[in-house]
Image (cartoon, rainbow, N blue to C red):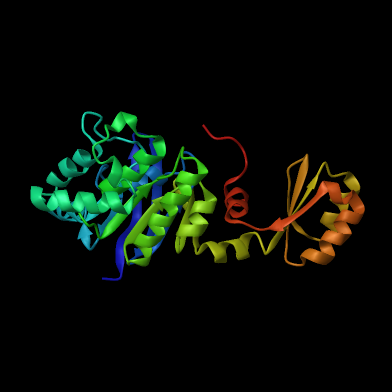
Amino acid sequence: MNYVVEADNLRKTFGAFTAVDGITFRARRGECFGILGPNGAGKTSTIRMIYGFSPLSGGSLRVLGEDVTRRRSLRRAKYRIGVCQQENNLDPELSVLQNLEVFASYFDIAASKAAGKAFELLQFIALENRRDTPIPELSGGLMRRLVLARALINEPDLLILDEPTTGLDPQSRHQLWERLEGLRAGGLSILLTTHYMEEASRLCDRLIIMDHGRILVEGSPRDLIREYAGKDIIEVGEPGEELRAFVRDRGLRHDDLGHRIIIYCDERDRLYRELSGRCGRDGCILRTATLEDVFLKLTGRELRE
């Protein structure tokens, strides 16, 4: 089996509102596949259908070869999936180790095996010295690491991460990234949603960007950056009409934001010299294009509810 997720014309509706509007994609075995999009794009609705929390409204969906529209197939798939949800829904009445041991029982893992597996996972996330610590005494970063460990207790074939590092400080985020990279290197298939473009660029082999329930683009981060943003970005603050005319006359790919112009280019040095000569170097910034540039170009820069 080459795919861990096969979605065809997948739909999710809530009354008259369509959250997921007929999307089709494949996530391959052994890769980290990302689902990106602004708030309300439909990515969380998609993820919830994949791990069986929310039923399909239309289309077909196979997870680990199982048709999840069928109850028995969905149950088999759930036993092979690990889910790291957005919320830190750990049991506050239990210790760090007990949270893992109790969760293991949901997968019919024997208590003797669960204890050993739980301690191995605590070592993996560097929490073995906090095994008896009550959950309320953990920081947000430690809780997220424990939620990840809990998602691995059943040795899943597919790990689903729904915004796993939201709210974490930079150190905690990088620690979690390192552990996820280790899991991916070991061959684990990962499905990731995130609002952090740096996270998606670092972890994802391929990804889709969604908006308004539909897929806008699909590809590797590098290919999408090359196609939609070019190699480099030149930002000009407070541009005058003369500079705007220059950009238009040269036919440069750009976004005019009023107080700032974003220029997408592949000939950085010569163009930067020309532009900085017109507006001064203090008002002209040259940088490498990123996935965030692609995301904003495709989904817009306005605030979302």
Q: For residue 132, which quarter of the picture?
A: top left
From the viewer's side, name the closer residue of 3 and 289.
Answer: 289
Q: Residue furthest front?
A: 129
Q: Is residue 59 left or right of residue 252?
A: left
Residue 216 appears in view: no
Residue 149: in sight, yes or no?
Answer: yes
From what the image shows, is residue 126 above or below residue 67?
above
Q: Please state which of residues 192 and 57 is positioned toward the viewer in this rendering.
A: 192
Name the residue at 27% across, 42% down. 54
Position of residue 194 measured from the top left corner of the image (x, y, whole percent): 45, 47
Q: Position of residue 184 (x, y in %)?
A: 37, 63
Q: How many marks?
A: 0
Q: Position of 74 compared to 223: left or right?
A: left
Q: Position of residue 289 (x, y in %)?
A: 65, 58
Q: Is residue 96 left or right of residue 109?
A: right
Q: Quadrant of the N terminus?
A: bottom left
Q: Residue at x 84, y 47 (%)?
A: 282
Residue 31 at what x, y percent from top left? 38, 65
